[in-house]
Image: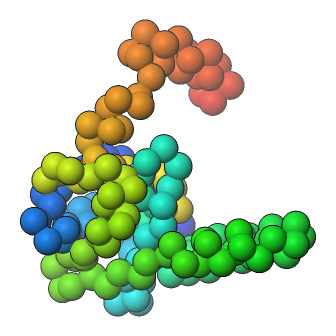
Amino acid sequence: MSENNNSFFYGRCQNKLSPKGQVAIPKRFRSVLSEEESQQGFVLIPGQDNCIYMYTHRQFGVIRENVRNIALSENDPEFFRSFMEEASPVDLDTQGRFVIPAALREYAQIKGNEILFIGMDDRIELWEATVRESQRPQEQDYRQMRKQKAKDIFGI
């Protein structure tokens, strides 16, 4: 993400997944990237709750350093090794398309032909839409939680 415009990823979009595992990053997310970041592509890693985290190379470097430091401080080289082993760099073609590796599609339980993209500030999450919907809080519970947090967030 361009450091000059303080951009970040937010919102949600869906795009079609080809039978070969290729999908286009939504234009609203591509527009956040600098030209250099678009040319470098992304790094995909297994995320929490059966999604895939999608980082720019620059942001992946920040995460990698955090993981490395934790592994060193805990004398756990396998933690760092596993993290690096599971990382998959992907290139974007001129139309913003990339292939989600089969192992990551399996991890994220991607079986349909729609990929849900959710902007999460410094990363994008890729979801099988049905998996995401099954993990969303019930509407009533979510409204109550949001109402409680709104006082702090919005000062109301």
The residue positioned 60% from the left and 27% from the top of the image is 154
Residue 99 visible in this rendered orientation of the protein: yes
* In the foreground, 51 or 76: 76
Q: Position of residue 81 (x, y in %)?
A: 66, 78
Q: Which quadrant of the view contains residue 94?
A: bottom left
Is residue 142 depicted above or below 123 in this figure? above
Query: From the viewer's perspective, is 151 left or right of 53?
Result: right
Color scheme of the displayed model: rainbow
Q: Residue furthest front?
A: 78
Q: Quadrant of the C terminus?
A: top right
Is residue 140 toward the left or the right of residue 153 in the image?
left
- Report the residue at 16% width, 49% height from top: 112
Please provide percent x and percent y for residue 127: 33, 49
In-front residue for pair 78/4: 78
Residue depicted at x 87% and y 72%: 75
Q: Is residue 23 left or right of residue 59?
A: left
Q: On screen, 139 above or below 75?
A: above
Residue appearing at x 50%, y 75% in the figure: 87
Give the percent coordinates (x, y) of residue 2: 49, 77
Instruction: Indicate the position of residue 22 as horizontal and vertical percent values.
Output: 18, 71
